[in-house]
Image (cartoon, helix red, strand yellow):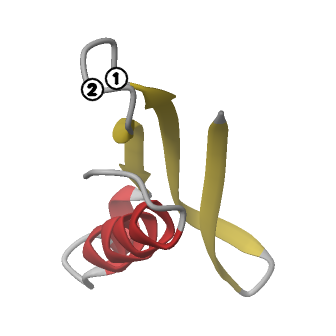
Amino acid sequence: MFTLQAANEDDKTVGAIVCKIDPHKRTMRSRGYIAMLAVDHDHRRKKIGKCLVICHRYNIVSTGSER
């Protein structure tokens, strides 16, 4: 399962994270992975990427997956 979250400012996407949640081969528990994280150059150093990662981790935990 892939998920996409975006950070927007004034109808412009300034950050995005693409995540993947898959069952682990050995434990059969789901694990979450960050496939891509991007923040617009003009909006870096504003903790947008950090917020996107925190949201992703919250989603992983809420589904019962490992991070």
Secondary element under disc 2, as helix, strand or loop, is loop
Q: Residue at x 33, y 12 (%)?
A: 25
Q: Residue 48 in the image: state x and y as whole percent.
A: 36, 77
Per the image, the residue denoted by label 2 is 27
Q: Residue at x 50, y 35 (%)?
A: 20
Q: Nearer the viewer, residue 49 or 63?
A: 63
Asked if marks 1 and 2 touch (Cβ < 8 Å), the reply is yes
Is 36 placed left or right of 27 in the picture? right
Report helix, strand or loop for mark 1.
loop
Number of the label disc, if any, that sits on residue 59:
none
Query: Quadrant of the rendered structure where residue 27 is?
Result: top left
- The residue at the point 25 percent across, 52 percent down is 67
Question: Residue shown at 49%/42% (left/top)?
Answer: 19
Whole-percent x and y of residue 23?
45, 26
Q: Pointer 1: residues within 10 angstroms few (<14), some, or many (20+)? A: few
Choose mark 1 or mark 2, whichever is in front: 2
Specify few, some or many for label 2: CA neighbours under 10 Å numbering under 14, 14-19, or 20 or more.
few
Left or right: 50, with 1 as reference point: left
Spot occupied by residue 51 in the image (x, y as percentages of width and height): 35, 80
Count of numbered labels shown in the rendering: 2
- Residue at the spot of label 1: 24
Q: Residue 61 appears at what percent x and percent y?
A: 39, 68
Where 26 falls versus 7 (above or below)?
above
Amino acid at circle 1: His
Q: Please state which amino acid type lies under the numbered disc 2.
A: Thr
